[in-house]
Amino acid sequence: MNLLDSLDLTKGDILKIFDIADRIEKGERFSLKKHPILVLYFEKPSTRTRIAFESAITELGGNAIFIDEKTTQRTRGETLSDIAKILSGYSDFIAARLYKHKDLLEIAKNSSVPVINALDDLEHPTQALADVYTIRNHRKNLSKTSVAFVGDIATNTANSLMTVFSRFGGPFTLIGPKSVNPNATYVNKAREYCKVSVTDDIEDGLEDVDVVYTDTYVSMGEELEAEQRRKLFAPYQVNSAMLKYAKKDAIVMHCLMAHRGEEITGEVIDGPKSVVWEQARNKKLLNKAILIYLSQSEDDHLE
Ligand code: CP
């Protein structure tokens, strides 16, 4: 079993992963079947996801091997299908951070071990699991919780967060410029489970919202359009004035890395409504739970 798309996750899968995370938090010890090796194959930089996975597998009794794509024979034309066959021959899991989702599917097709999406152009499912777990820590009943994603509503983070959160039925709002269209596939799929609204009106969009979520305006690979994007999204900066439209006790989230003064002010990200450090810490916990869940699913498959 792989974790490639948030779209593949049922509410049952998510609850099982959350249950493993809860049990780890209560001190239950899980060990994987044998000394497991996790290969991290990354084309893009990472501060959190890489280290969260490396520390997770280490605490589960295994080892991580990190490979920056630039140091592999990929730079001299080796195919991803060959690389996937080789890496899966040496390891028990592969976590890949890639520019293109289709390349992740190519790795998964040629891997003999579970493949995990550690971010690509369409998805960031491990982030979304940590995010929704964090929201659940603050709002027990997710079906009565409303989330607004503010800013660049066409991102991988928005797609995965909307999809995972939708499984619990609470309303989800995408607030961003009129000229930016969210991914229709993800919006339509989420609408099978919850109400999804799309608006450019900040005041309307934030009415009665429990969770205000934002992300960088310039995702990895979009650096050439940086100035243009900063201008486009500037009115959607999450700041104290904007938060007056949300519920009084609303929490603020950001998947990080943050650009203080751009998508969010320092006053907000470092202020009392922010749960971003807890959110980032939960990435290690949820990555552990994902590794355990995938290895249990592999065992079930073999039985
Ligand atoms: N949130 C996140 O994926 O962080 P990194 O890019 O640092 O891994």
Image: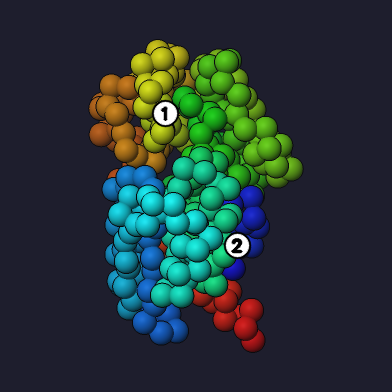
Amino acid at circle 2: Lys
Residue 247 x %, y %? 47, 29
**Residue 121 shows which numbered tag?**
none
Residue 40 x %, y %? 38, 60
Numbered disc total: 2
Q: Is residue 296 above or below residue 127?
A: below
Residue 109 x %, y %? 60, 62
Label 1 SS: loop
Q: Which residue is mark 2?
A: 109
Amino acid at circle 1: Glu
Residue placed most toward the observer, 287 or 141: 287
Mark closest to the chain's N terminus, 1 or 2: 2
Pointer 2: residues within 10 angstroms few (<14), some, or many (20+)?
few
Residue at x 31% of width, y 73% of height: 63
In which image quadrant can residue 232 be found? top left
Q: How far apart are labels 1 and 2 at the CA level? A: 28 Å
127 relative to 11 in the view: left or right: left
222 relative to 180 in the view: left or right: left
Residue at x 43% of width, y 80% of height: 32
Residue at x 67% of width, y 32% of height: 184
Q: Is residue 207 visible?
A: no
Q: Is mark 1 within 8 Å of ligand 1?
A: no
Pointer 1: residues within 10 angstroms few (<14), some, or many (20+)?
few
Label 2 SS: helix
Query: Of discs 1 and 2, which sits in the foreground?
Result: 2
Q: Is residue 61 visible?
A: yes
Q: Which residue is mark 1?
A: 222
